[in-house]
Amino acid sequence: MRLLEYQGKELFNQFGIKIPESILAENVEDARIGAQKLGFPFVLKSQLTVGGRGKAGAIQKCKDTSELETKFDELLKKEVKGELPRGILLEKMVDIVKEIYLSIFLNRSKRCFSIIASSEGGIDIEQTDNKIIQDISIDGISGELANAIASNLNIPDESKESFVNLLLNLFKVVVEKEAELAEINPLAIISDDSLLALDAKVIIDDNALFRHEDLQKYLYLSDLEKQAAKNGFSFVELEGDIAIIGNGAGLVMSTLDMVTDANGKAGAFLDFGGRATSETIYEALKVISRIPKIKAILVNLYGGIVRTDLVALGILEAYMNNVLTVPVYARISGAQSEKAKELLNGSNTRLFDTVEEAINAVVLKINTN
Amino acid sequence: MSTQFDIFRILSGIESDADYEKKPVIIQGITGSFGSTHTKLMRSYGTNIAAGVTPGKGGSKFEDVPVFNTMAEAVQASGSAISGIFVPAPFFYKAAKEALDNGIKLIVAIPEHVPIIDSIKVYEYAQKKGAKMIGPNTPGVIIPEIMKVGIMPAQPFTKGNTVVFSRSGTLMYEVSFHLSNSGFGQRLGLGIGGDPINGTNLIDSFELIRNREDVDSVVVVGEIGGDAEEQLADYIIKTNFSKPVVAYIAGRSAPKEKRMGHAGAIVYGNYGSADSKINNYAKASVPVAKSPREVPLLLRTRLRK
């Protein structure tokens, strides 16, 4: 779960990492009140979970009331990479002396957390060679190491202690809130030598959410995603018109690639996990049926443990209850597949022996309509 | 340490062992619905499930397998060095630690949705104990036609001389099915796991078979997310890995910053993208199949060279 900037800053604040004074506004009335409290000028920042806000013009300076009226509305309606903001953060401007980049991230191949730091703040960290990467133990960061990083970044002596404390606190955020990433870019040293987190990018480990009740309020799912999550499905909505359902993330991804290679356009990705029964397929079809743009469904099931005939019954039930109106193209390998074919004979579902045949049939059907 | 870890010796032993190919295995969570279903399937495949653990059910039996309250008792009674963990994710850390504290040398971690920090802690602890973890979020490990510890179906696998390492469960079955159909049996099938943290990652897996004469080739089933494939390509180049390798990567057409089912299958910027993986494989002369069906075709070409 990627937190919005203001949510990440709420966490930082809880852990003693200083942030600029700011107010979240979801509508222009809130923004007017916020502006009065904060005082002009300030910065308007779209609250998004996608990167590249600055370049997309979703961060704007605001110097007076008339600018607020026009810019606030403009930002609220502005999509970045297909995403509308969930509120705009009004944030006080500060006197920046120096900007730094600092993050702690899950280093997957090293199987530990690592610090990345750079004396150039506000940049795209992937694009610079001027950075240090330091692996850290899950048991903690020593003061010595934090000091060495401060020296490496040429942090002025007056701010060194603040930096060391901030780094230790950022590590606490990662461990205590179970984040995969906690990034401050930029981290500003301001005119009174203190440090302020001007931005916050925090990604929480979804699998740890069950033991963090305080973070669950940040979970933001569409109705479809909620319905999918309730059933334990992994679901991603895509741009096209073919829904792809299967058991296992890799298999569904692989099917998505093959559909794309065959000039089909996938509109949904749904992995219903290890257990394929008539109920799971029925619930999966129910989720998909709520997406109007879907014109056909491709089912790819693999597993010797899967009872194919039970899956077929789930599909039939979906038709009988009018959950399903679009055709289903299915490749179901597993036990009892002959029986499954018999069951589905005469329905709007076609069974194929290979996934390639199923894909060719569904793409042909959609692209010739 | 990984070079000395002989997974074949642990899983099936050597011919002079009295229990050759019948090494005892413990199942933690044996009475749960998942654990019990797969205990039956593993036994019918030939795995010697010698004991089970479910706290509170000690003294009972599942089929004719004795169930214990603790790992200490189960290890003492069975002499197992292998444990298949089938408990729900929130209980995984405790179960794994208990296994390692009682001398287990190989943990097969089946549960999905284990918190990352728990995986890191178990991994670090296993390192300290000279033990290994496969997974979490893995279908397990199989020596075809001999034994399996995991949830994979039996049908796709046949014995032979290639090995399959996979970040995805169902794709491991799918690719093995196509390999078997084309006459490429497997010496070993090992699920790396779909999580960001893998107790046994791709490089560790390559180390397991690097010097084995009964392995003539390697199939790597990868997916988007992380840099496991990039690191592997680098390893193949730097260590002059000499066996033919064929790869597959799922998720080429997935959107960025979306988690595609697996916790580990997510692309940030170029980090974790299929392009990055394919480019790195190209540097290591590893061909990448376009679909699971193409894997045996590429393997045949590579083996002819």
Image (cartoon, coloured by chain):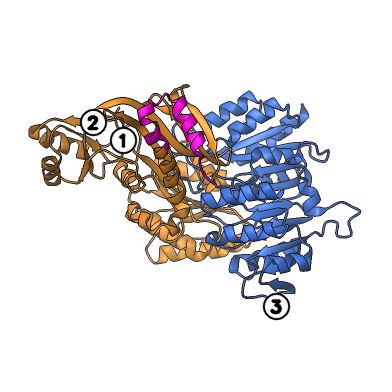
Chain colours: A orange, B blue
Q: Which residue is mark 3?
A: B59
Inter-mark Cα distance, 1 to 3:
60 Å
Q: SS for tag 2?
A: loop
- The majority secondary structure of the magenta stretch comes to helix
Judge by depth and name the residue closer to the eye, B215 or A103.
A103
Inter-mark Cα distance, 2 to 3:
68 Å
In this rendering, would A161 be left or right of A273? left
Q: Position of residue A114 (x, y in %)?
A: 51, 37
Cβ atoms under marks 1 and 3 closer than 8 Å: no
Residue numbers of the magenta segment: A139-164
Q: Chain of mark 1?
A: A
Q: Who's the residue at 89% across and 60% down the image?
A: B18
Check disc 1 and give the amino acid type. Answer: Leu
Inter-mark Cα distance, 2 to 1:
9 Å
Occupied quadrant, residue A168: top left
Q: Share a chain, discs 2 and 3?
A: no
Q: Position of residue A153 (x, y in %)?
A: 43, 25
Is residue A91 something that shows in the picture?
yes
Q: Estimate how packed mark 1 is, as few (under 14), some (14 to 19) or many (20 or more) residues with alpha carbons within 10 Å.
A: many
Residue A196 numbered mark, or none: 1
Check disc 2 and give the amino acid type. Answer: Val
Asked if A261 appears above or below A357 in the picture, the reply is: above
Is A156 inside the magenta-drawn segment? yes
Foreground disc of the pair 1, 3: 1
Occupied quadrant, residue B155: bottom right
Check disc 3 and give the amino acid type. Answer: Gly
Judge by depth and name the residue closer to the eye, A351 or B26.
B26
Q: Which residue is mark 2?
A: A94
Judge by depth and name the residue closer to the eye, B299 or B266.
B266
Q: Residue furthest front?
A: A158
